[in-house]
Amino acid sequence: MWAHVRAAILLTTRRGGAKIAARMSDLPSESEIRARIAAARTQAGPGFDIPYRNVADLIDRRAAATPRKPFLIYVDDDAGVRRETPYVAFRDVTARIAGALYSLGVRPGDRVATVGVNHDSTILFYFGAWRLGACVVPINVEEMTDRKQFLLENSGAVIAAVQDEYLAEIAGLRSRCPALRTVIRLSDGPNAPPGADVELAKACSAAREAPETDEATLDTDAFLVYTSGTTGPPKGVLLAQRNLFVDANGIAEWHRFTDGDVLMCVLPIHHVNGTVVTHFTPLYAGATTVLNRRFKASTFWKRVAEEGVACVSVVPTLLEFLLSANEDISKHDLRRFRGFICGAGPLLVDTARRFEERFGFPIQHGYGLSETTCYSCFLPVDLPKGEHTAWLTAHGFPSIGCAIPHNEMAILDEAGNEAAPGVRGEIAVRGWTVCVEYYRRPDANTAAFKRGWFWSGDEGFWKPDAQGRKYFFITGRIKEVIARGGVKFAPLEIDEVLISHPKVKFGMAVGFENRFYGEEVAAYVVLKDGLSMSDEEILEYCRPRLDFKRQPKVVVFGTEIPYTSTGKPKRLELARRLAPELAKHRETQFRERR
């Protein structure tokens, strides 16, 4: 087994394979790595007693309890589509999909990939695969072709369910993906493009339901989600059905979601946030979810009002889009709307303050990773307004709140000791939300699972409240920390200042190589439409607001905002893009003005 894993890494890792191979001889044994992962997954206690055998059991019981109630409402404003799927239809369709997959040879534990946009057919396919006990591998349609190939190869997907626009691309990869047996057309309707072996709708019509089986359990693999991989090959985060249940329970309990609530999805469903928060959690709670084909600021508040939405999960980027749209929301009936879940990217203090002052709805800021299923912590929902605002704005960074049920969090130093309040270290998580493993990556497992914790790679600190609860803060990725003259600091602090300038649409600080201090600070700035300013104006603006070591020394203006598909700024990629331009300042010694 261990030899097979080593070989698989060498064969499937297109980028960074040589570096991984060089470290293989230094890795612990497979049994030791398994023990490390087990410790990180169980040290928070035994977990709660999940009252369902598997995903199929959950779906069936929800359909029996409220058959006619809508579970999934799909909306595409551009196409003029609004489509409801009641719980009973959700059960029947997912059962047919499970049967179609079974007839195609898929069995519990097999990997089935999806290449699809936000669409009800994609979500129905997810849950149909989970009914059967298959493991879904969601592939972002925006990935480059070679990366799609890597994900198909590395996951060992036997099926790819693909929407029409991407059929030719995926069909062209089949000869290079030996495990891939069948390409399924997810879309329905006439004029099918070439490339598919099977149309999902026809396969479901012809198929019987998959036979009842006890093979799908809470410990069956469910989701294989690949990380961004901006500094190397993507890492596959493997989650079991248990992970989905545990995090859904923690999220639902924290936010007090009930079967009377409606949640709304505007985030991409190839990511855990869009799937776990606004699809699996509503199913777990017996609630309703509204899936939007895409986020549109111009129709957002109208949709929230018309569907009676209670909560929407967003990333900070979308808050900025809503602020820019600056819609008068008094014309909408928003009495059922309670506020926003926000995470999956750096929230600036200025953004949080402006948004809550402008719209009046609370931002329940939180934090989590694919490796911890989704969310690990949130601000408490019952905080008095003043206390809520203080945790968002009074400490330099918005608090990500307190650990939710079924996991623990800590700030650790390099030796694994817990940091004192206010002292920065690495955010660590342990408990039943932690992933099964990094798939086929013993090197990544060795680095991340240590001393009974999953180490996130994010820097942060914590502060206690009057009740002794630990409120956590994230200051940025450890790899993004700028080290100038032996002093390390988070670039997010500089971002806050840049974005506060009235002419700046987007600002991001990056470190660049400098002979005198090791690293110096540069500012990448995108101006608001129609405005102009000089380098010196930016530098002058930053001087009274930042100490000298944190002040940008060089400004690069641009027009592109480097976000991932899930709204995270791509700081490391931006630094690499700017490196040739910034290299001319490598020999410059920047001096403080007196």
Image (cartoon, rainbow, N blue to C red):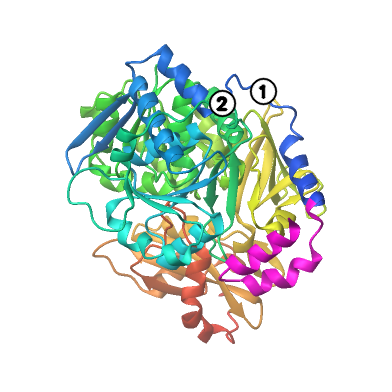
Q: Is residue 415 left or right of residue 539?
A: right
Mark 2 near mark 1, Cβ–Cβ under 8 Å?
A: yes
Please tell me whether mark 1 sits on a helix, a strand or a loop: loop
Q: Give residue 30's position: percent from left, percent from top.
A: 78, 53
Task: Please report whichever mark, 2 or 1, sits nearer to the chain's N-terminal start.
Answer: 1
Residue on which the image places disc 2: 249
The residue at the point 64 percent across, 64 percent down is 9
Q: In which quarter of the image is the C terminus?
A: bottom right
Please tell me whether mark 2 sits on a helix, a strand or a loop: helix
The residue at the point 29 percent across, 42 percent down is 293
Question: In the rendered image, which quarter is residue 358 located in?
Answer: top left
Question: In the rendered image, which quarter is residue 511 located in?
Answer: bottom right
Q: Can residue 164 be seen in this view?
A: yes
- Looking at the image, residue 526 lies above or below residue 433: below
Q: Does the magenta stretch include residue 12?
A: yes
Q: Give residue 582's position: percent from left, percent from top.
A: 50, 80
Span colored in magenta = 1-30
For mark 1, does the 10 Å Cα neighbourhood hold few (<14), some (14 to 19), or many (20 or more) residues? few
Residue on which the image places disc 1: 48
Q: Is residue 19 left or right of residue 79?
A: right
Q: Is residue 519 left or right of residue 386?
A: right
- Amino acid carrying mark 2 in the image: Asn
Q: Which secondary structure class fits the magenta region best?
A: helix
Q: Give residue 369's position: percent from left, percent from top.
A: 57, 46
Q: Residue furthest top?
A: 65
Which label sits on residue 448? Answer: none
Q: Can residue 594 be seen in this view?
A: no
Q: Give residue 104's position: percent from left, percent from top.
A: 43, 43
- Amino acid carrying mark 1 in the image: Phe
- Looking at the image, residue 125 lies above or below residue 178: above
For mark 2, does the 10 Å Cα neighbourhood hold few (<14), some (14 to 19), or many (20 or more) residues? many
